[in-house]
C-alpha cells in the first residue's frame, strides 16, 4: 500500500542503516585507493581523517587561533544574519503581495525576475556594492533567499480559503487582526518548510563567496586545503557543514511540531 505507515523504531533503524551503508562505502573506497597508492590523499583513511581533525583544532603557531573554531564562528554568524534578513524581508513582501492586490501587481514581477538570477553569478556585483566585508556575505545570502521565499509566502496566502477571512470580518476583526490571526497563522507552518528548503542554497551562496574572497570561514579554509590536497581537513569540514545544516533543519522541524502540531501530524 502506498504511504503505508511503519513503526517509529523501523524508521530509526532504516535511517541508521542508510548512514552505515554510506560509511561502509567510504571505508571500502579508501581502503581500495590506499592499496593502489599508499600515499594517496584524495580519499583519506579514518586515521588520516583523525589527524586532519586534530590539525583543525590545534592552535596555529602564527595566529594562536584554532581553525575550526574561527571558521565555524565566521560562517555561522554570516549564515544566521543573512537568513534572518532574508526571511524577515520575504515574510513582509509575501504577506503584502498576498493581501493587497496593488502591491501584488507592483512587487510580483521583480520578485519573479530576481528569483531566476543565481546569486553566485552576481558575486562581482556584490563585491562592487558592499566590498568584501561582513555585510557582503550577509547581503548575498539575504538576496539569494528573499525572492523565492517571498513567492512561497505569497502563494501560501493565496491558498487560504476565502471563508476564513470572511468569517473573521463577520465577527468584527480588523484588517490587521485578519492578517495576523488568520492569514499569517495559516502561512506560518508552510513558511517553516520553505525556510528549511532554503538552508542548503544559503550555504552554497556563502561558501562560494568565502571561497572567492574570504579570509576566514569554511569556504576559505576548504579552498586553501584543497590547493595542497589536504583532504583529511576538507572532508571533516564538509561533514561539519552537513551536520550544521541538518541541525538547523531538525530545529525548525521541532519548532513546527510544537507551534503547529496540526500541520506536522499531516505528514512531512
Image (cartoon, rainbow, N blue to C red):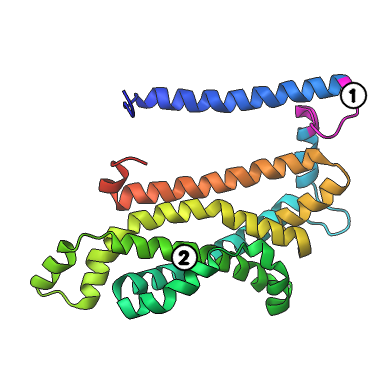
Name which residue lies at 36% across and 50% down: 256
Examine the rendered structure and indicate whether residue 260 appears above or below residue 212. Answer: above
- Label for residue 146? none
Q: Nearer the viewer, residue 51 or 119?
A: 119
Q: Mark 2 and 1 residues: CB-CB less than 8 Å, in contact?
A: no
Question: Toward which corner of the image does residue 208 lie, by quadrant?
Answer: bottom right
Judge from the rendering whether residue 164 lies leftward or rightward of residue 259; answer left or right. left
The percent coordinates of residue 221 (x first, y second) are 77, 53
Label 1 packing within 10 angstroms: few (<14), some (14-19), many (20+): few
Quadrant containing the N terminus is top left
Examine the rendered structure and indicate whether residue 64 appears above or below residue 237. Answer: below
Q: Which residue is mark 2?
A: 87
Quadrant containing the C terminus is top left
Question: Toward which corner of the image does residue 188 lie, by quadrant?
Answer: bottom left
Name which residue lies at 82% across and 46% down: 226
Give the mark nearer the N terminus: 2 vs 1: 1
- Label for residue 38? 1
Task: Name the secondary structure under disc 1.
Answer: loop
Name which residue lies at 77% across and 25% down: 30
For the record, the magenta segment spans 36-48
Q: Compute the Cα span from label 2 to label 1.
A: 49 Å
- Is 46 magenta? The answer is yes
Q: Nearer the viewer, residue 237 or 117?
A: 117
Tell me if I can see residue 224 in this picture: yes
The percent coordinates of residue 220 (x first, y second) are 77, 56
Task: Name the secondary structure under disc 2.
Answer: helix
Label 2 packing within 10 angstroms: few (<14), some (14-19), many (20+): many
Count of all numbered marks drawn on residues in the image:
2
The percent coordinates of residue 66 (x first, y second) are 76, 52
Tell me if I can see residue 84 in this picture: no
Amino acid at each position: 500500500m502506498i504511504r503505508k505507515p511503519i513503526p517509529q523504531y523501523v524508521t530509526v533503524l532504516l535511517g541508521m542503516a542508510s548512514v552505515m551503508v554510506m560509511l561502509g562505502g567510504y571505508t571500502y573506497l579508501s581502503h581500495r585507493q590506499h592499496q593502489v597508492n599508499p600515499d594517496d590523499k584524495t580519499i583519506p583513511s579514518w586515521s588520516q581523517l583523525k589527524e586532519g581533525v586534530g590539525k583543525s583544532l590545534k592552535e596555529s603557531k602564527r595566529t594562536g587561533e584554532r581553525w575550526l573554531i574561527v571558521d565555524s564562528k565566521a560562517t555561522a554568524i554570516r549564515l544566521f544574519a543573512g537568513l534572518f534578513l532574508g526571511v524577515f524581508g520575504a515574510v513582509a513582501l509575501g504577506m503584502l503581495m498576498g493581501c493587497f492586490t496593488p502591491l501584488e501587481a507592483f512587487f510580483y514581477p521583480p520578485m519573479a525576475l530576481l528569483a531566476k538570477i543565481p546569486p553566485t553569478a552576481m558575486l562581482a556585483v556584490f563585491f562592487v556594492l558592499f566590498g568584501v566585508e561582513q555585510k557582503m556575505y550577509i547581503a548575498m545570502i539575504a538576496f539569494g533567499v528573499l525572492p523565492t521565499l517571498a513567492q512561497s509566502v505569497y502563494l501560501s496566502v493565496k491558498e487560504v480559503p476565502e471563508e476564513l477571512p470572511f468569517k473573521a470580518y463577520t465577527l468584527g476583526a480588523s484588517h490587521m487582526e485578519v492578517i495576523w490571526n488568520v492569514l499569517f497563522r495559516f502561512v506560518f507552518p508552510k513558511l517553516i518548510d520553505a525556510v528549511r528548503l532554503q538552508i542548503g542554497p544559503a550555504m552554497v551562496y556563502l561558501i562560494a563567496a568565502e571561497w572567492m574572497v574570504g579570509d576566514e570561514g569554511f569556504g576559505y579554509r576548504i579552498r586553501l586545503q584543497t590547493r595542497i590536497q589536504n583532504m583529511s581537513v576538507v572532508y571533516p569540514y564538509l561533514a561539519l557543514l552537513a551536520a550544521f545544516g541538518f541541525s538547523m533543519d531538525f530545529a525548525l522541524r521541532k519548532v513546527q511540531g510544537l507551534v503547529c502540531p496540526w500541520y506536522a501530524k499531516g505528514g512531512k
